[in-house]
Amino acid sequence: MLAKIVFSSLVAFGVLSANVEQFGSFFNEIKKEQEEVAAKEDALKARKKLLNNTHDFLEDLIFRKQKIKELVDHRAKVLLELENKYKKEKEALEKETRGKILTAKSKAYGDLEQALKDNPLYKKLLPNPYAYVLNQETFTKEDKERLSYYYPQVKTSSIFKKTTATTKDKAQALLQMGVFSLDEEQNKKASRLALSYKQAIEEYSNNVSNLLSRKELDNIDYYLQLERNKFDSKAKDIAQKATNTLIFNSERLAFSMAIDKINEKYLRGYEAFSNLLKNVKDDVELNTLTKNFTNQKLSFAQKQKLCLLVLDSFNFDTQSKKSILKKTNEYNIFVDSDPMMSDKTTMQKEHYKIFNFFKTVLSAYRNNVAKNNPFE
């Protein structure tokens, strides 16, 4: 009986053990599924969070992109405004300096027509002094001065000093001086040539005055030179025709003196240009001034001559001039020989050279001012 009970217990325990193993496996599967579900839920939560973050990031990105666009548009607008403002200021500065240069040239050359009309050498041109003297009812001191402009010997002539001498006596004295010939044809020829000279002066004067009145003309020096060349050619032609005409020799001398006076006035006028340089505020203004100067249709040699006129108008002492010219020459050699300048155009090189020259002159001038006026 006992054995039966023991056997039954063992059987029951075996069955129970077998069931426990089955249930354990089942619970493990449930637990595993729960863990997987939990993991998926966590993954979904993480994904949802990531999506939310991505959404926020995209919204922020769109916002920032919009702001960047606004800033870029604003920057472009400001830059355009600045560019337009700078362009207008630059154009205004160029126009101003160009106007100053033209004004300086105009002052330098002066009103030739008026200058010639005011010049006694021009006013007193006498096609035929013999006829002029004979036609005077009286021969005044002014008449003597008129003739003296052309005929220096009149000043020392005893006949012209006598108060009792008649106009006929004085005309005869002119003949004796060899001032002109009694030959009628020769006198007529001399009169025609003298009139041609006078007309040439008037034409040259009017043409130059017209050029100077055209303020918009950039290369005015070029056209002024053309007028001068035309005039010189005409004057040379007249002079050749007058080689054997005695009367004309003195008139030619007088005319030459008149032109010299005009040229002197032109040279002195470059003081006006030096005043432009003296009042330059900075390198930008100096650069604009240089640009307008170098844009003239002149050869570099001609521009260099103008630069020398500018230098002369500053009235430096000899040593200062030599120093400025030496520095200028050294810089010009550097510009021509430096490999870094090989890609520059001729005009650009000219600009560098003249800009450096003006800057050197300006520096020397300001150093002199500071030295002479230490408290200014």
Image: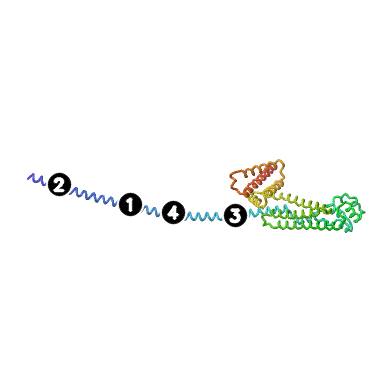
Colour setting: rainbow
Q: Would you call the spot at circle 1 few (<14 residues within 10 Å), some (14-19), or many (20 or more)?
A: few
Indicate the secondary structure of the residue bearing disc 3: helix
Separation (CA) of disc 1 from disc 3: 62 Å
> Closer to the observer: label 1 or label 3?
3
Mark 3–mark 2 Cα distance, whole angstroms, equals 105 Å
Q: Amino acid at mark 2?
A: Gly
Do the CB atoms of the residues marked 4 and 3 lie less than 8 Å apart?
A: no
List the residue tagged with mark 2. 14
Which of 3/196 is in front?
196
Q: Could you tell which of marks 4 and 3 lies nearer the N-terminus? A: 4
* Disc 2 crowd, CA 10 A, few/some/many (<14, 14-19, 20+): few
Q: 177 or 88: which is nearer to us?
A: 177
Q: Nearer the viewer, mark 4 or mark 3?
A: 3
Q: Earlier in the sequence, mark 1 or mark 2?
A: 2
Q: Secondary structure at mark 2?
A: helix
Residue 28 in picture, x, y percent from top left: 23, 49
Label 4 sits on residue: 61
Q: What is the spatial separation of the Cα atoms under label 4 and label 2, in whole angstroms?
A: 69 Å
User: Could you say which quadrant of the image residue 121 lies in?
Assistant: bottom right
